[in-house]
Image: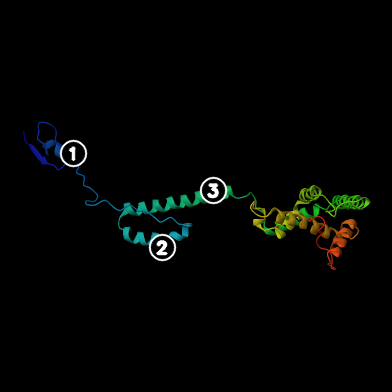
Amino acid sequence: GAGLELVVLDYPAPSKRGFGTIRLAWKEVPYIEVFTSFTRGDDRPVIALTQRNAEHLYADEVSGILDQVKNDDRQTLELALALEKEKVRILKRQLRQAKSAPTNPSPPEDNITQFLISIEYEFKGSRLQQFAQEKNLAYKKAWNDHYTGFHSLDRLLPESLADDIYTEIETKFPLHFYALRNIMFGFQAFIPSRSHLDLTSKKRSLTNYFFAMIRVRDSNNLIYWAMVGTMAMFNNGALIQHFKNPLIG
């Protein structure tokens, strides 16, 4: 019958009518719709942005890409989508950082104030006075025991008691203890390969410096410790103010 034979490309025609052709009746022609591809040739390059740490750092890069694709609606939209993805990535990173940060961090001034309150609290009440009296009595007893009978010229306090005093200072007055230890001890002092005698000597020195500062606070404290130390320094030929007690380290 009468009609129109349409030759098409890359399209299989219905069977029995031949490949690449379509026969249309005249009454079907008004219903034909023709579509063409938007572009032909190579695919468009994918829009990708460099990862940056803040949104404003994308201004120059986005402006440069936009000048190249502004006549292509599709690539312009792809650029906008890429920018939004980077914004989401930055927000997610900021959210992770916020969750990992301490809650309501205090400013440095508040931290210093809190430290001063805490370190003063260690000496509240009779804690320091009681500690000083106990240690003074320990030196008095060691003095009496040492010179009551015949003893070898050994240290006045046994090593175990000296270690106990060091540990007690750390337990009862931790802020003062660690302030002194950080000043007097280097990081390598606690390495096992270091000399044990060197570490022991520093521990004894810390105890003596702590006792000395207690006496600066009140010269009525630790009288027997001061007396023993001064005698030991005089015996060693040092006619200077006592700062280290060689009898306990």
Residue 37 shown left or right of residue 115 in the figure? left
How are the colours assigned in the image? rainbow
Q: Quadrant of residue 225?
A: bottom right
Crowding at label 2, few (<14), some or many (≥20) Cα neighbours within 10 Å? few
Q: Which residue is mark 3?
A: 96
Which badge, 1 or 2, is on the more N-terminal residue?
1
Q: Nearer the viewer, mark 2 or mark 3?
A: 3
Q: Which mark is residue 60?
A: 2
Image point 38% across, 61% down: which residue? 63
Identify the element where label 1 is drawn: helix
SS class of the residue under badge 3?
Answer: helix
Disc 2 residue type (three-letter): Asp
Choose the circle earlier in sequence order: 1 or 3. Answer: 1
The residue at 86%/63% (across/down) is 235
Residue where numbered disc 1 is placed: 31
**Amino acid found under the numbered disc labelled 1:** Tyr
Residue 211 appears in the picture as rendered: yes
